[in-house]
Image (cartoon, rainbow, N blue to C red):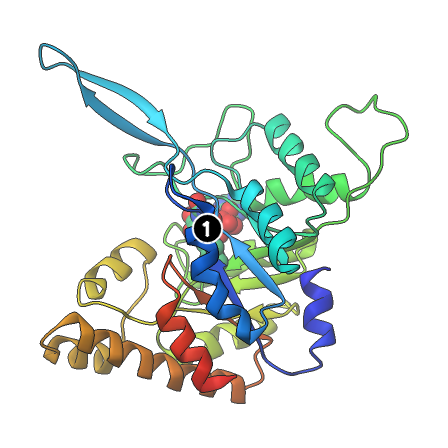
Amino acid sequence: MKVCEHLKRANGKTLFTIEILPPLKGENIRNLFDNIDPLMEFKPPFIDVTYHREEYVYRKKDGGLLEKSTTRKRPGTVGICAAIQNHYKVDTVPHIICGGFSKEETENALIDLNFLGVDNILVLQGDAIKSEARFVPEPDGHRFASELLEQVVKMNKGIFLDDELQNTTPTDFCIGVAGYPEKHFYAPNLKTDLKYLKLKVDLGAEYIVTQMFFDNKKYFEFVDKCREAGINVPIIPGIKPLTGKGQLTILPKTFHIDIPEDLADEAEKCTDNKAVKELGIQWCIEQSKELIKAGVPTLHFYSMGKSDPIFRIAKALF
Ligand SMILES: Cc1cc2nc3c(=O)[nH]c(=O)nc-3n(C[C@H](O)[C@H](O)[C@H](O)COP(=O)(O)OP(=O)(O)OC[C@H]3O[C@@H](n4cnc5c(N)ncnc54)[C@H](O)[C@@H]3O)c2cc1C
């Protein structure tokens, strides 16, 4: 079933949903299921699965020379979606990115997903390759999420890349996109960023999932600004608990977000990461309570490979 249907059927009740990462190459899918199993108690109607593009790796050769190659450390997004749907009978939302894909490869991936009975996709530009300063599209790929979205919308109308194809069967994907309460880091300002977010919605995105935030005020202001800009689709808040002191610097650096002063000050006072995790869980519970009170469609938790803090939070809320 489509995400939009799930949101409609919830009838104003806030749902519990999660985003998971494919396991590292070589790991067993059982480990992933062990992580998801406890969260099934809270009946997530859909699970997002991230997509991770290739990275450059350098290996030392005889004589000390470095050999450069590429590898994908977390492959398996499409297979994991099918495995989750099969194992838990829960809908999945694979993330589909522009980076590393030609239009033809995108089309083929969407055909696979369609055949596997996946009804949803989150359409994204995707992260830049780790060692590259900026996102670089493939020569025959898409630069922006809006361009990739246009390709999916066309496929939903039965229009494939080969315009000589006859009697095609249209796909029927429900399309989500990303939004940034604290502005996307490439955007010169929030107004410009919202202009492109509106473009994605005007082209056919049916809902928005936000980047993580630790201050609900940022989310509420973002929703207000979206509505003023004429963006009227559901805006799903993405959240995660702080679980270690190192995240005080890693999260702002990686995701271009702020950690509120109160939370950062309290975390600094903690003597170990166990205490930071406890603080982070309590902060996230309070954040979630306020978001539920405001009637958000679903609380979407970024699990980042660890379900135990999410379990504690969900247990306190649902
Ligand atoms: C909920 C969520 C899930 C994510 N999942 C993944 C994942 O699974 N894998 C992964 O690699 N990354 C993921 N990301 C990261 C995301 O891919 C990066 O943040 C990326 O840099 C931006 O993606 P986007 O889809 O928002 O890009 P876009 O919507 O393409 O926007 C990118 C930037 O370009 C600007 N822009 C957009 N359109 C235009 C235009 N036509 N002309 C000029 N400027 C424009 C925007 O303002 C923005 O600054 C996720 C992010 C979020 C919030």
Q: Quadrant of residue 274?
A: bottom left
Residue 48: x %, y % from top left? 54, 56
Which residue is depicted at the point 58% across and 53% down? 84
Which residue is depicted at the point 72% across and 42% down? 114
Residue 62: x %, y % from top left? 12, 11
Name the residue type under label 1: Arg
Q: Quadrant of residue 90?
A: bottom right
Q: Quadrant of the N terminus?
A: bottom right
Residue 166 seen in render: yes
User: In front: 130, or 189?
Assistant: 130
- Queried on whether the Cβ of the residue with tag 1 lies below 8 angstroms from ligand 1, the answer reads no
Which residue is depicted at the point 45% across and 47% down? 22
Q: Which residue is mark 1?
A: 30
Residue 199 seen in render: no
Residue 146: x %, y % from top left? 59, 46
Q: Is residue 205 above or below residue 280?
A: above
User: In front: 270, or 28?
Assistant: 28
Q: Is residue 215 above or below residue 170?
A: below
Q: Is 106 on the left-hand or right-hand side of 76?
A: right
Q: Is 245 on the left-hand or right-hand side of 28?
A: left
Q: Is residue 310 above or below residue 87?
A: below
Q: Quadrant of residue 264?
A: bottom left
Q: Is 147 on the left-hand or right-hand side of 61?
A: right
Q: Residues within 10 Å of mark 1 (few under 14, many from 20)?
A: few
Residue 145: x %, y % from top left? 55, 45
